[in-house]
Amino acid sequence: MSEQVSQVIVPVDGSPTAAAAARHASLLARLLDAPLQLLHVMPLNPAELSDIPANRQPDADHDRAMRQEMAAEAFALARRAIDPALELDPTEAVLEDATFIRHPERAIVDHTRRHGGCLLVMGARHLSDVGKFMQGSVSNEVVHRARCPVTIVHADASMLEASRIGRILLPVDGSRHSHKAAWLAGDLARAADIPVELIFCQPGGQVAAEEDEESQAERVFRLAREAVGEIPAGIDEQLLHQERFAEAIVSRARHHLEEAPMIVMGRRGLGKWRESLLGSVSHRVIDLAPCPVTVVV
C-alpha cells in the first residue's frame, strides 16, 4: 500500500466521463492496494429553487425518490466500468443534506477532508476559457480547493485509455510540491512496473552560463530521483528549453501517447482569482493533456 494513499474516491453521476473516471480510479486503487469508494452527490434540481425543502417529507418526496434511483443507476454503471482485477468490492457513499447540495465541488472536497490519505479521481468536462472564468467547472474547483492528490481523466477518454498506464511523466522543479508528486509517481511506477520520465523546463531565452544551466538541471534531476526512489523499469530525463511550460509538458504526453502516459505533478498554490487571471501550469496541463493528470498538493 502507498504511504500517501489509503483510499481512492471517485464521484460518479452516470455519465460516460464518470464511467471512464471510475475505471481509472479502480486501476489506481489496485496499483496502490487501496480501497475504492464510489461517491454520488445528490444535486439540487432546478424545480426546487423556488421550493422549501424543509417542508417536504422524505418518504413522500417524489423528486428525491427519482434522484435516489439516478444515484443507484450511477453506481451500477460505475461498477460495470471498474477494473475486473480489483479484488476488494468498492463501497458507496451518497452526499446530501436537508437543504439539498447547491455546490457539489465543496461537498466533494469536504468529504475528502473527512477521509485522510485519499486520492480523488474525477472526470472533466471541457469548457472554454471564458466559460471557466465566468462559471467555473467542478473539476477545476476541486483541484483548487482539495488538500489531497486529485486525478483528472479528460472528457474524451475511452474506457481502454482509462484502463492502463504505460509511463509516468513527472514535471520537476526542485520544490516541495514536486517532491510530493515524485513520491506518488514512484509508488505507481513500481506497482505497475513502468518507467518514469522526469521533465524539467527552463525558459528558452533565460540568460545563464551553459554550465550553470546544466548544474541547475542536474540538481533538480538528482533531487527528483531521490524522491522517486528505485524504479526497476527505469528513469529518463528530459530538459526542455521552452517559455510555455504547460504546452511543453503536454507535448511530451502526446509524444508518448501510444504508451498510455499519465502525468503526475505538484501544484503551487495561487489564490483563486490569480489562477483565473494568470492561469496555472497544472490547470493548463489538465485542460490540454490527452491523458490522465494527477495534481499533488
Image: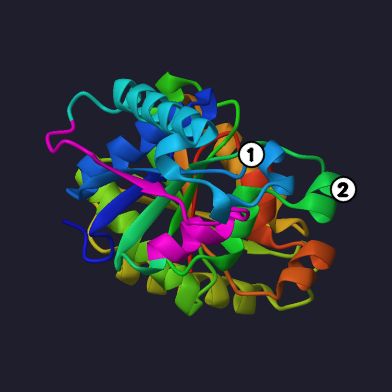
Q: Residue at x 28, y 65 (%)?
A: 4
Q: Secondary structure at mark 2?
A: helix
Q: Secondary structure at mark 1?
A: loop
| Nearer to the camera, 57 or 166 | 57
Q: Which mark is residue 9?
A: none
Task: From the viewer's perspective, tell me whether residue 228 is left or right of residue 260.
Answer: left
| Nearer to the camera, 60 or 253 | 60
Precedes in sequence: disc 1 or disc 2? 1
Given contact means CB atoms under 8 Å apart, are the residues at marks 1 and 2 in contact? no
Question: Badge 1: few (under 14), some or many (20 or more) residues near its Cα, within 10 Å?
Answer: few
Question: Separation of disc 1 and disc 2 at Cα?
Answer: 25 Å
Task: From the viewer's perspective, tell me whether residue 274 is left or right of residue 143.
Answer: right
Q: Quadrant of the N terminus?
A: bottom left
Task: From the viewer's perspective, tell me whether residue 237 is left or right of residue 288.
Answer: left
According to the picture, the residue beneath numbered tag 1 turns out to be 45
Q: Is residue 120 magenta?
A: no
**Location of residue 29 in the rendering, given as x and y in whole percent from the top left corner:** 25, 44
Q: Is residue 110 magenta?
A: yes
Q: Is residue 100 visible?
A: no
Residue type at mark 1: give it. Answer: Asn
**Location of residue 172 in the rendering, given as x and y in whole percent from the top left corner:** 51, 65
Q: Residue at x 43, y 21 (%)?
A: 159
Q: Is residue 94 above or below residue 268?
A: above
Q: Residue at x 74, y 65 (%)?
A: 203
Q: Toward which corner of the image does residue 208 lie, by quadrant?
A: bottom right
According to the picture, the residue beneath numbered tag 2 turns out to be 130
The span picked out in magenta is 86-112
How are the residues colored? rainbow
Q: Residue at x 18, y 33 (%)?
A: 86
